[in-house]
Image (tube, rainbow, N blue to C red):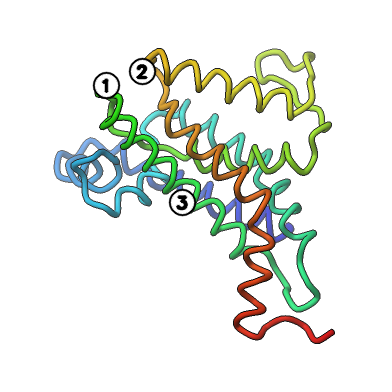
Amino acid sequence: MSDGQRTVAGIIALNSVIFFAWQVPNPVLRSFMKRHFLHAHDTPLHTMLTSVFSHRSIAHLGFNMLALYSFGPLSFKFLEKQETELEGTSVYKWLALYLSAGLLSNLASTAATKYTQRTLMPSLGASGAVYSTLVMSAYSNPDIKVNLIFFPWFGFPISTGVLAMVGFDIVGLLRGWKLLDHAAHLGGAGFGVFGSLYFNDMFRRTRGVLGYNAPA
């Protein structure tokens, strides 16, 4: 397995463990999970991170992890192609993208709750973080073909699919649809755009400041 595949496999494993913890019918454990693995404006601050790995339904977990399995390594390759000879892996760079997108997606969800005055359910799940890898994959490989799960014979460019998904989430947020956390999705997508445009340059500049750049 490549570094990207191993990193994605580790995240899928962690998400699976937390999912199974949700399934245990123990009142004490269930209360602990609600306190520490759901994010809302009145939950502890660390839930902005822990909720990124939290799923309560098998469908939610399955769709997010399938998307992560499909596009996580592809976004990893984009970051890896920008490496200097001094670096041996993009694991930390990719994790910075994934976790930051997850945090920003939760921040966007909280902001939507406060400033749109709509009652939104506490958020959980990796959708925002996965969205960032999907956007980066579309940026780096705009013409790659993807297929819908339920209509595998229907293929289209990944860039078209991402634009359609972002448009759907914008409409959903403006119209107040509550089936999905559209604000979180858009937060993750926004960070994916930022990461595609500036992440590699940021890391390169940081290495220069710290004196880790290879000599000319």
- Residues tagged 2 and 1 counted as in contact (Cβ below 8 A): yes
Amino acid type for the residue under numbered disc 1: Arg
- Look at mark 2 in the image and give the residue it sits on: 178
Select label 2 or label 1 by which is in front.
1
- Look at mark 3 in the image and give the residue it sits on: 14
- Look at mark 1 in the image and give the residue it sits on: 118
Which mark sits nearer the N-terminus, 3 or 1? 3
Q: Position of residue 14 (x, y in %)?
A: 46, 51
Amino acid type for the residue under numbered disc 2: Lys
Taking the spot 68% from the left edge, 53% from the top edge, the residue there is 5
Marks 3 and 1 sit apart, C-alpha to C-alpha, by 32 Å
Q: Nearer the viewer, residue 26 or 189?
A: 189
Q: Quadrant of the N terminus?
A: bottom right
As drawn, is 20 to the left or to the right of 2?
Answer: left
Q: Position of residue 103 (x, y in %)?
A: 42, 48
Dot 3 lies on which element? helix
Which mark sits nearer the N-terminus, 3 or 2? 3
Q: Nearer the viewer, residue 166 or 115?
A: 115
Dot 1 lies on which element? loop
- Residue 2 is marked as none
Marks 2 and 1 sit apart, C-alpha to C-alpha, by 9 Å
As drawn, is 64 to the left or to the right of 216?
Answer: left
Q: Position of residue 122 (x, y in %)?
A: 28, 33
